[in-house]
Image (spheres, helix red, strand yellow):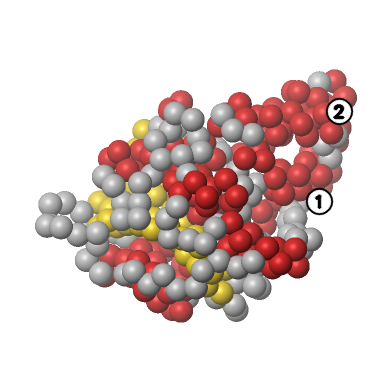
Amino acid sequence: MANFALEVTRLGFSTLQAVSPDLAGRVAFRLFCRTPSPRPKGARAKAAHAAGATRLADAERFTLKLAGGAKAHAYRLNGGARGKRKRFLVTHGWGSSAEYMVALISMLSATGAEVVALDFPGHGRAGGRFLHMGLAVGAIAAAEARFGTFDAVVGHSFGGAALMVSAAGLLPGVAPVTCERLVLIGAPSEMHWLFAGFGRMIGLRPAAQAALEDRVHRVTGRRLDEFDAGNTVGAIGRPVLVIHAEDDKEVSPAHARRYGAAGRSVRLFWANGFGHRRIVAAAPVLGAIAAFLEGDRGEEGVSDENIKKDAEIIPFFELPARRAAL
């Protein structure tokens, strides 16, 4: 968010919360959930998006209708009745789309598996400019209802967190995704840090901040602090591969260590040097995912000492970076 726009936003919230902290919290939630334009910005993003669109040109396309009129979009590769084969689901991060996940999608489809790649509401071909965790988990449930049970699910950043929330059956009334294995790439392990940082950025005082966080409970049926690796990893009881880079400047590596400490079913794979975005197409990452999906369990989780060591380094980023990250 540009400095001038941020100052105007802070001034607006200062005035609004003086009148009604609850209204300020509700408006802040709408702003928090507003997604960026799906149009790529910058030469590199445009080139990556164009290349991804070309490689997805022959994929089947589906519209998935969600509660409240929202829609998700799905690509399917190797679909149809072609005999027994594995089925994988791929989800993207905030501000991203299936086009940016095409290296992973192509690797999975090259195995002969049926691959479904989602565009969450507010992203890619789904349309709209609004997304929250409840809608993302609803899109995952809609994908399973449309295509059938997935053997494994793979998600980047916000998309990885949404897969964990879904697999754990955390949201009341939303069918959990059923899969044998999960892969999380650069995914946050909890959400409180984002809301706290967002509130600081726009200048929310405690009452308005509480109202903002209460909106999460109202739209998902769960309190903000329940969206935590301790609640999700223990609930699913299935092998999880957590891939992260220690040079990730948008989602701290402390999140990966928290996942690792949350259960013995978690394997950590460090893809250092690939940051937050390049990691989804890095050859070592694709190789690790392929091996894991073939049955390689690898290492087990890490100890709580690693969490304590990194507990204070989870950063807060300005709004544009946060939206790109998640």
Determine which of the numbered discs, if any, sits on residue 15 in the image.
2
The residue located at (51%, 69%) in the rendering is 300
**C-alpha separation, residue under disc 2 versus residue under disc 1:** 18 Å
Q: Circle 1 is placed at which residue position? A: 3
Q: Residue at x 12, y 57 (%)?
A: 83
Q: Residues within 10 Å of mark 2 (few under 14, many from 20)?
A: few
Residue appearing at x 80%, y 46% in the figure? 201
Give how far across and how far down residue 26 sits, in percent: 69, 27
Q: Disc 1 residue type?
A: Asn
Regarding residue 121, the answer to whether it shows in the image is no
Tell me which residue sits at (64%, 72%) in the image: 246
In the image, residue 320 above or below residue 260: above
Classify residue 208 by image quadrant.
Answer: top right
Q: Is residue 321 left or right of residue 203?
A: left
Asked which secondary structure carries label 1, the reply is helix
Q: Nearer the viewer, residue 316 or 36?
A: 316
* Residue 220 x %, y %: 55, 32
- Asked where in the image residue 85 lies, by quadrant, the reply is bottom left
Q: Amino acid at mark 2?
A: Thr
87 or 106, nearer to the observer: 87
Instruction: Please tell me how many numbered marks the rendered image carries.
Output: 2
